[in-house]
Amino acid sequence: MIRLFKHYVPHAALLLGLIDFVLLMVAAELGWLIRARQVGFPPGSLLERLPQVLSFAVPLQIALLAVGGYAAGSFLSLRFAAARLMVAVSMGVIFLSLIFFFFPDLSYWRSSLLFSMVIAVVLLVVERALLGRTLGGDRFKRRVIVMGAGERAAAILALAREPGSNFIVAGAIAMNEAESAVHEAIPRSAIPNLRQFVLDREASEVVLALQERRNALPYQDLLRVRTTGVQVYELSSFLERQTGRIDLRSVSHSWLIFSDGFSSRRMWSGMVKRAFDIAVSLILLVVALPIILLTGIAIRLESKGPALYRQRRIGLFNEPFDILKLRSMRQDAEVAGQAVWAEKDDPRITRVGRFIRKVRIDELPQIWSVLMGEMSFVGPRPERPQFVEQLDQQIPFYAERHMVKPGITGWAQLNYPYGASIEDARHKLEYDLYYAKNYSPFLDALILLQTLRVILWPTGAR
């Protein structure tokens, strides 16, 4: 995997993205040349129309990223890839229309644009049919040696067997007799030369997955492996890279303290984030106001009570604040103000409420909280005080999620469905900690883009 701006990107996804970009440039150029030949217009050189070619390729590439065109499913299923591709092209038409409206000098002839769109769809579908399974196959997967044969090592093997996994376990080594969860593991005593064993298996990484590390770290073995150029990873670091979350079962205080990251409070990144929040919230409030008004009317027509309501939440540094939401439940949803987890097919949710929850319209009034500085567009979801008190006592490191400003959307919302239990909160915290640790404007931009995927293909909304 490659680390871009502190975020981990699989090699296959990056390579597919680069090939896509080249094909989109080719499609833009061919569309122009075809139309120029039809009307007898001198085509000129590519350099002369490079801005127009880029204005076609870049928005479509962004649209592919936004709808999940580089997710693991794109390498496993041509049907999945084609569906994402068609939605991305449709979105790309909207993006291009806006670009050409505001920047007329970048516009293509409409006929050239049509040709380019058709060519792009054909090229990208053929590319995924030919390369999808190859890029998702074993050739592009990392080969990993697991040192350990206990439950932690077994969890790595299970992760490698999941569809879309980008690594292969090339071997497991039982470092002591007490670890027996991985039956195919080779005893360390049966390997005369560990360095040669790793090289023979063509491994690029070794993961330390011992159940008990006190006085058991094989320093000499690890040093010999590392000096051959093979990367050695502690289990928590490996899982962070592989899953995009901080695994609470393996992480320790010392790992969190001494690993890099947690830079969201740095001056320049904080200034960029706040400037973006102010500028975009001002624009979105103007755009969203008619939607909020129409939704409010629909809510009032269906059920008694106000369309908007305030709810106390816990924000940055455990400070409480009130958020505004469009009401999606009955007025008597919570007796005496007692907080209750939302359930699947919750009977308290109205018909209008079910729709606005799926498409996230009920969150629109929170843009005001972003403008006021109580929230950001991207960050962990702010939780209710009653739940925070309960979760802080039962889940380790839960308080650390309040070290970054809460957000309307976030890394956990993209990667985990709606949480309505202690266990769900634990899983979402793993993604929130990853975001807090690896924050960058790049990760914020990625989350904002892919929030569109969650809106188009809602999962777990309650």
Image (cartoon, rainbow, N blue to C red):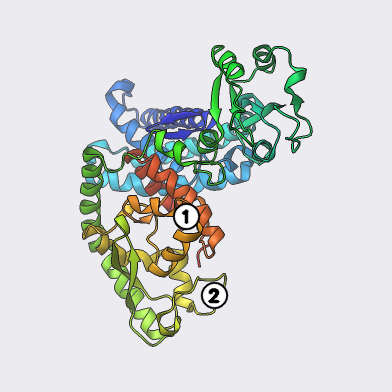
Under mark 1, the amino acid is: Val
**Disc 1: CA contacts within 10 A as few (<14), some (14-19) or many (>=20):** many
Q: In this view, does 295 lie above or below 151?
A: below
In this rendering, position of residue 421 left or right of residue 369: right
Residue 86, position in %: x, y?
51, 47
Question: Toward the viewer: 426 or 16?
Answer: 426
Q: Give me the residue at 52% from left, 55% from top.
A: 426
The extreme bottom residue here reads: 304
Marks 1,2: beta carbons within 8 A: no
Q: Tag 2 or tag 1, which sits nearer the N-term?
A: 2
Q: Give me the residue at 42% from left, 63% from top.
A: 388
Q: Is residue 139 above or below residue 245?
A: above
Under mark 2, the amino acid is: Asp
Residue 215, position in %: x, y?
59, 28
Residue matched to label 2:
346
Q: Give me the residue at 55% from left, 23% from top.
A: 232
Q: Is residue 220 above or below residue 154?
A: above
Residue 318 in sight from this viewpoint: yes
Q: Give me the residue at 51% from left, 61% from top.
A: 418
Q: Residue 454 carries which label?
A: 1
